[in-house]
Image (spheres, rainbow, N blue to C red):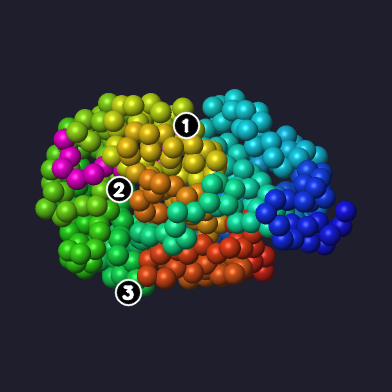
Amino acid sequence: MTRRALLSLAVSPGLFPSRDREEAVSKVTVTGLETFVVKVNRRGNWLLARLQTSAGVTGLGDASHGGNDALTAKLLGQFLELLRGRPLFQIERLRAAVAAEVARQGRPAAVAFSALEQCLWDIQGQLFGVPCHALFGGTLRNRLRCYANINRSTEPRTPAGFAAMAERAVRDGFDAVKLAPFDGMPRRDAAAIEAFTQQGLGCAAAVRKVIGDKRDLLIDAHSNFDLERGLELARRFEPLNLFWLEEVTPARRIADLAAVNRAAKMPTAGGESIYGVKGFYAYIQAGAVDILMPDVKYCGGMLEMKKIAALGEAAGLPVSPHGVASPVGHFAAAHVCAGLPNFLILEYSYGEVPWRAELVDPPERLAGGHVELSGRPGLGLKLNDRLARQQAA
């Protein structure tokens, strides 16, 4: 069957798929993969995957920020061979097949699998003529509130620098802003640690002054504190009325995070680096945080994010996906969030590059700090190949 004939079936009317459409789609297989490395800034590039099929339909996925782009690209190729010539619907089988490699290689393997998983959902949505969120149970909302993460774009990393970037985000309509003012924390010298902590508190205070009391301030500690200093940090942040305090101690120290969570007067959040429902189960069971932050690139993809959110719902915890991502990763997470009963707010990497919106077609648009999902099939966007090549790393 030709691509044109297949796509005409995908968009044909009717409550249920026709037998012809179902049979045609079932015969579509994975045939190849393209990767694109797009230069962003010193904090990392975007690594995008585009999966090809026998029907000529392609799907996009975000494999960025795995910590080693060369290894991630190699693993994308390795995992592709598990898909090549196979139907598009064996996502759980693929997850099981890569489990040992994810355990051995860590984040590079996690983001490689997650990207291919996003690609598969994008393709399925296009073939059936429905947006990805329809494949995940439909929507409770089409418009999602986002916060501006200004941490990756702010230079200089001073109170004035953070305040200036926060002011830009507010002018662009965001009513919630996040920064991580403790990056580069000294490790041993107590006096240096205290001086750096005071500077970070000063950066947060400067942003609070700029955004005012009616907007939300989010702080990511990036696991830079031990338990004793983390407990003190939570106390010192009380006057700033935080929306949340994120990842004070390393995620592997679940007992320490839980202790901070019990003591903190503001909500705590975290979990961005955790892979899979098994990892999140222990995190939730320990009471590590008040708000779960799975990352669609790190956690195992869109279906895994849905499962993690369901664990959170059962435990009475809201979900606010981590998302220092390209527009592709941002939309992948948004499609899942659209139907989550316990969705809170979605991360948006603000101000990194001026051409971000144009990297996809139609261009990414946020209005009033919200992303709005369309009814376009799949993820609802295509890669701007010309710009991706122009900005190639």
Residues at discs 1 and 3 in contact (Cβ within 8 Å):
no
Badge 1 density bin: few <14, some 14–19, many ≥20, Cα 10 Å? many
Foreground residue among 25 and 194 = 25
Quarter of the rendering occupied by the C terminus: bottom right
> What's the mark number on residue 220?
2
Q: Amino acid at mark 3?
A: Arg
Residue receiving disc 1: 277
| Secondary element at tag 2 | strand
The amino acid at mark 2 is Asp
Which residue range is magenta in the image? 263-274
Looking at the magenta stretch, what is its main secondary structure? loop
In front: mark 1 or mark 2?
1
Is label 3 in a helix, a strand or a loop?
Answer: helix
Residue 122, above or below 224:
below
**Label 1: element kind:** helix
Instruction: Identify the residue shown where x is 13% and y is 48%.
Output: 238
Q: Is residue 80 visible in this depiction of the protein? A: no
Task: Look at mark 3 in the image and give the residue it sits on.
Answer: 171
Instruction: Give left or right: position of 328 versus 140.
Output: right
Note whether residue 365 is visible. yes
Disc on the earlier residue, 1 or 2: 2
C-alpha distance separating marks 1 and 3: 38 Å
Q: Is residue 25 left or right of residue 102?
A: right
Tag 1: residue type?
Val
Image location (x, y in percent) of residue 96 = 62, 28
